[in-house]
Image (cartoon, helix red, strand yellow):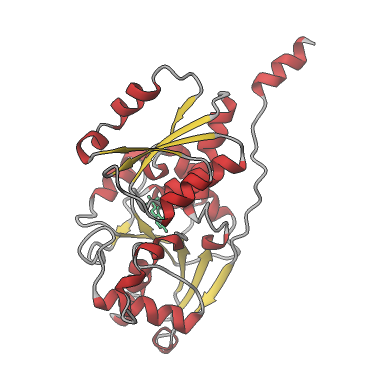
Amino acid sequence: MKQFSLNLFSFNVMLPFKIHSPETEVTLPLWEKKHIKVTLKRDDLIHPFISGNKWRKLKYNLQEALQLQKNHIVTFGGAWSNHLLATACAGATFRLKTTAFVRGDEQVNNPVLTMCQLFGMHLIYVDRDSYRGKEKLYSDYFGQDPTAFYVHEGGYGLLGAKGCAELVDELQQDYQHIFTACGTGTTLAGIANAIDKKDLFTQIHGVPVLKNGSFINDEVAQLYPHLAAPILHLDYHFGGYAKTTPELLAFTQHFISSTGIMIEPTYTGKLLYAVDDLIKKDYFTPADQLLVVHTGGLTGLLGMYERFAFH
Ligand SMILES: *Cc1c(COP(=O)(O)O)cnc(C)c1O
């Protein structure tokens, strides 16, 4: 009997969630001409709402919460946050209560936040100043709630990075280069750490989608101090987070219509624009194999459709 109850408290929580993320070769005429092979890691196919790297970043956070017998996930995000939608859907899937602090005014509403609420997420709108004090918000609202579990904005942190590292274990071949878009740098850090552990020759590249993206190196160093800094391509933010230019929008449309694979301008559009531009500039050696992580997040298009030229 004693044995049994001990086991009950020490069991390892495994979420019943099997993922599908194949490696798909893609090409554009210019990439073919330059003999650069590009493969997409289709994390966008993991789930329509628990999309891409957001599932990977949530996985160990949710397992930790369940292990501590906490069934209320509290997190943070902007009004179009892929992380909030993923958390809301994962919460409904695994029967966890979810609350999000949303940066913005009371009036903010959009299809992503509607979907969050459909999944049962409770939203608390906070102005930009209060939003900066996340720990204070958490303790003010949920300091007394023993079931609450704090998940960082964007799934940032070591638990998130640990989930992202699993992407490397799934790979069917070795690559000279792996590229990912960066918001918090958690995905990049997880991949870089996994490559480092495996002692592979692969170069890790990040494309920050925010202005002044060199902070990503500090974030990676904070998570894994022993790692050599990944290569950051700092000039593909197009003015800042969720900012676009006609060139970016035109490239995004060109890529989608040439490959049949949907991307969006906030993350994967900037990422693939960077890859395309680097290929154009002969950054790579012919016959190099590139892996580009499609981190999903396609619901971001819902806030951007009016920017495209057909409107
Ligand atoms: C959140 C997100 C990212 C950023 O990932 P980080 O681990 O925060 O750097 C990249 N791509 C998409 C589609 C995202 O939703």
Tell me: residue 257, above or below residue 76.
Answer: below
Q: Is 308 left, or right, of 196 in this rendering?
A: left
Figure disc tally:
0
Location of residue 147 in the rendering, given as x and y in whole percent from the top left corner = 51, 23
Q: Is residue 38 visible?
A: yes
**Where, quadrant-wise, is the C terminus in this rendering?**
bottom left
Which image quadrant shows ligand 1?
A: bottom left
On screen, 269 above or below 109?
below
> What is the residue that sits farthest to the top in this orientation?
2
- Residue at (47, 61) in percent of width and height: 296
Task: Name the residue located 36 percent from the left edge and 53 percent from the top edge.
Answer: 80
Of residues 308 and 213, the one nearer the viewer is: 308
Quarter of the N terminus within the rendering: top right
User: Residue 156, located in which quarter of the rendered image?
Assistant: top left
x, y (%) of residue 2? 76, 10
Question: In the rendered view, does 256 fall on the left or right side of 166?
Answer: left
Q: Nearer the viewer, residue 197 or 147?
A: 147
202 in relation to 250, above or below: above
User: What residue is at 57 percent from the left and 65 percent from the top?
Assistant: 173
Of 104 and 254, nearer the camera is: 104
Q: How far across and down, in percent of the image, does residue 291 sit?
A: 47, 67
Q: Nearer the viewer, residue 170 or 304?
A: 304
**Which residue in the rendered view is the most extreme toward the front?**
107
173 left or right, relative to 287: right
Residue 310 x %, y %? 34, 82
Residue 249 picture quarter: bottom left
In the displayed structure, 147 sits above or below 124; it is: above
Residue at 54% in and 31% down: 64
